[in-house]
Amino acid sequence: MDKDTDKEKYIQQEIFKLLHSQTTVLILLAVFLALSFCIVDYLVTPENFNKFLVYRLIWGFILIAFYFLNNKYKRTKYFS
């Protein structure tokens, strides 16, 4: 019975590692895309560029905060 729980624990840890790595990549991609759309904002509506730039920077900081929280959760999950 103890072997089964060790296997289940190992499987759960590996699933967590996989999901964490995918989440990290997706968050970084979202930061890149959110900030790169500033170019589109400038080309399409230059009169609203400053307003949209502020929105995109706020979104970028929020996503970066998610990135750091994601890494913090990883460390606490693996070592506790």
Image: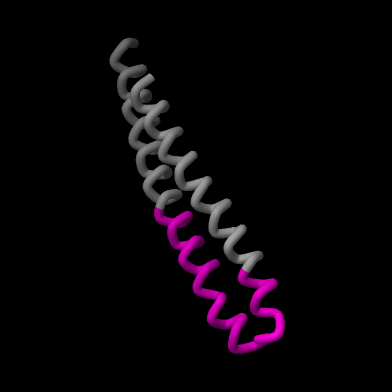
Q: Position of residue 17 (x, y in %)?
A: 36, 39
Depth check, front residue: 20 or 45: 45
Find the residue positioned furthest to the left. Answer: 3
Find the residue positioned furthest to the bottom. Answer: 43
Residue under the point 56% across and 76% down: 38
Placement of 26 over or under 68, stated as above or below: below
* Residue 49 is inside the magenta segment: yes
Q: Is most of the magenta stretch helix, strand or loop?
A: helix
* Residue 7 is inside the magenta segment: no
Q: Position of residue 59 (x, y in %)?
A: 60, 59
Query: Number of numbered discs present?
Result: 0
Residue under the point 45% across and 43% down: 68
Q: Which stretch is magenta?
A: 25-53
Q: Is 35 left, or right, of 41 in this rendering?
A: left
Placement of 53 over or under 73, stated as above or below: below
Q: Position of residue 29 (x, y in %)?
A: 45, 62
Find the residue positioned furthest to the top. Answer: 1
Residue under the point 54% across and 67% down: 34
Q: Is 70 left, or right, of 46 in this rendering?
A: left
Q: Is 61 left, or right, of 15 in this rendering?
A: right
Q: Position of residue 77 (x, y in %)?
A: 41, 27
Depth check, front residue: 6 or 49: 49
